Image (cartoon, grey):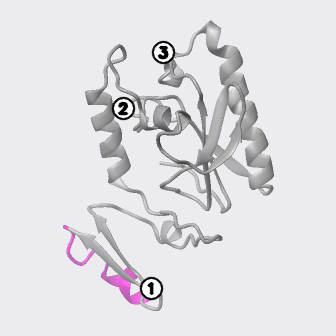
Amino acid sequence: FQLMVCGQPGRGSDAMLRLRRLSRTVILPMAYVTLRQLAVAPTSSRSFSSIPRGGEVERAQRAADERTSSTAPPTIFDKIISREIPASVVHEDDECLAFDDVNPEAPVHILVIPKIRGRLTQLSKGSEDDKALLGHLLYVAGQIGREKCPEGFRIVINDGKQGAQSVYHLHVHILGGRQMTWPPG
C-alpha cells in the first residue's frame, strides 16, 4: 500500500511505510484520512470507496447551482423510472423504485426514489401532503435494509447544497454490508 497525500509533502510517509504490505495506491488530494478509514475492506465483490471523495461534494454544488425548480430537466432518476437508462431494480411498487447505486459507497448501496418527482426534489421541500409518500419511502428502505443487511444498515437522505445532494429528485440511500463509522462526514 502506498499512501500519497498530494500537496502535503512528507505527510503520508510514516503511513506509507507501515502500510506498504497492501497492494494498491491511493492518491488523496489535500485530504486527511485516518488509518481506520483506510482499513475498511469490501466484504463483497462490488467495489466501493471507503475514502472521502471531493467529487461528490463538487457534483452536489454544481447541481445546486445549475437547477431551477420550474425548469429542471429530467434527472437521471426520471430516466431510470422511464427505463431510458437501465438499473438493477431491487424493489418496485406503485409509489417507488429501489435499485443498486452505480457508484456504491458500501457493499450494499441501494437508492429508493419516488416514481413521481414533482416538487419533492428535496426532503426540505416536503409538505403535509407528502407525509404518506415519505413514510412509504422509509418503510420500503427499512424492509430492504433488513433483508439485505441483517446485521444493520444506515439510511441517508442528502438535502441541498451543503447536504451534498447531487441529484434533485428525492432519494433515500440504504448503506450496509460493513461496519459504518461515526461521524459520517
Under tag 2, what secondary structure? loop
Q: Are marks 2 and 3 in contact (CB under 8 Å)?
A: no
Q: For marks 3 and 1, give the CA distance.
A: 49 Å
Viewer-side residue, 102 vs 180: 102
**Residue mark closest to the camera, 1 vs 2:** 2
For badge 1, the amino acid type reads Leu
Whether 183 is among the magenta residues is no
Looking at the picture, does residue 91 appear above or below residue 119? Answer: below
Q: Are marks 1 and 2 in contact (CB under 8 Å)?
A: no
**Residue mark closest to the camera, 2 vs 3:** 3
Q: Earlier in the sequence, mark 1 or mark 2?
A: 1
First to last magenta residue range: 7-19
Viewer-side residue, 101 vs 27: 101
Under tag 3, what secondary structure? loop
Which mark is drawn over residue 119? 3
**Residue mark closest to the camera, 3 vs 1:** 3
Under tag 1, what secondary structure? loop
Left or right, 109 with respect to 124, comes to right
Q: Position of residue 24 (x, y in %)?
A: 41, 82
Which mark is drawn over residue 19? 1
- Quadrant housing residue 133: top right
Q: For marks 1 and 2, give the CA distance.
A: 36 Å
Q: Residue at x 65, y 71 (%)?
A: 43
Q: Residue at x 70, y 32 (%)?
A: 138
Which mark is drawn over residue 161? 2
For badge 3, the amino acid type reads Arg
For badge 2, the amino acid type reads Lys
